[in-house]
Amino acid sequence: MMAGSVLADFSIYRRLNKYLIADKQKAVTILEGPAKLPVFIGVGAVLLILTGIGMVSIFRESVTSMLWFRVKMILVLLVVLNGIVLARPGAVKLKATLQQNGDNRRIEGLGRNLRNIYILQLILFLSIFILSVFRP
C-alpha cells in the first residue's frame, strides 16, 4: 500500500515536471491531486511497521537474529523518515513557490530535488522487497 502510493505520487510528479515552468497554474492544480496520498502512505507505513513487530512477537529471536530482517527494518525506517523529513516539506515548498510565481530556476531545482527524493524512496522499497523475497 505504501509503495503503491509512493509510486503513484512519483508518477504524478513526473507529469508535473512538464508544467513547472510552462504553465505554473496547471502545475499547482496537478499538485492538488496527490494531496490525499500521504494518508495512504501513512497507513501503509503503520501496517508495515506493525507487521514487522508482529513477526518479532511471533518468531522472536529466530527473526531478529537474521541480518536480512534487521536491514529491512532499518530500510523501512529510512523510507518513513525520508517521506516525513524530505518529501512532504519539498512538496510544500514547491507548491508555495509555484503559487507565488517564484523564480524558474528555484522551481526547477525544487522539482528536481523532489524527483530525486521519490527515486530514493522507490530504490528503498525495491531493496525492502528484494530482502523480503530473497532472504539470505
Image (tube, grey):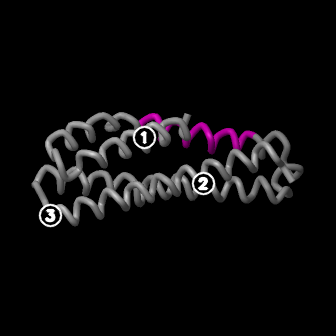
Label 1 to label 2: alpha-carbon separation: 17 Å
Using the image, tell me which numbered label, if any, was put on residue 116: none
Using the image, tell me which numbered label, if any, was put on residue 103: 3
> Who's the residue at 38% across and 45% down the image?
14
The answer to whether mark 3 and mark 1 are in CB contact below 8 A is no
Residue range highlighted in magenta: 38-54
The reply, left or right, for residue 90 in relation to residue 60 is left
The image shows residue 125 at horizontal and vertical percentages of 61, 48
Q: From the viewer's perspective, is residue 37 above or below residue 114?
A: above
Q: Which residue is mark 1?
A: 11
Nearer-the-camera pick, 69 or 125: 125
> Who's the residue at 14% across and 63% down the image?
103
Looking at this view, name the residue that lies furthest to the left: 100
- Mark 1 or mark 2, earlier in chain: 1
SS for dot 2: helix
Looking at this view, name the residue that lies furthest to the right: 62
In the image, which is nearer the foreground, mark 1 or mark 2? Answer: 1
- Mark 3 or mark 1, earlier in chain: 1
> Who's the residue at 52% across and 53% down the image?
121
> Does residue 99 belong to the magenta stretch?
no
Q: From the viewer's perspective, is residue 84 above or below residue 50?
A: below
Question: Which amino acid is tagged 3?
Answer: Asp
SS for dot 1: helix
> Who's the residue at 46% across and 52% down the image?
118
Which of the 4 image quadrants contains residue 12?
top left
Query: Taken as a whole, is the magenta stretch helix, strand or loop?
Result: helix
The answer to whether mark 3 and mark 2 are in CB contact below 8 A is no
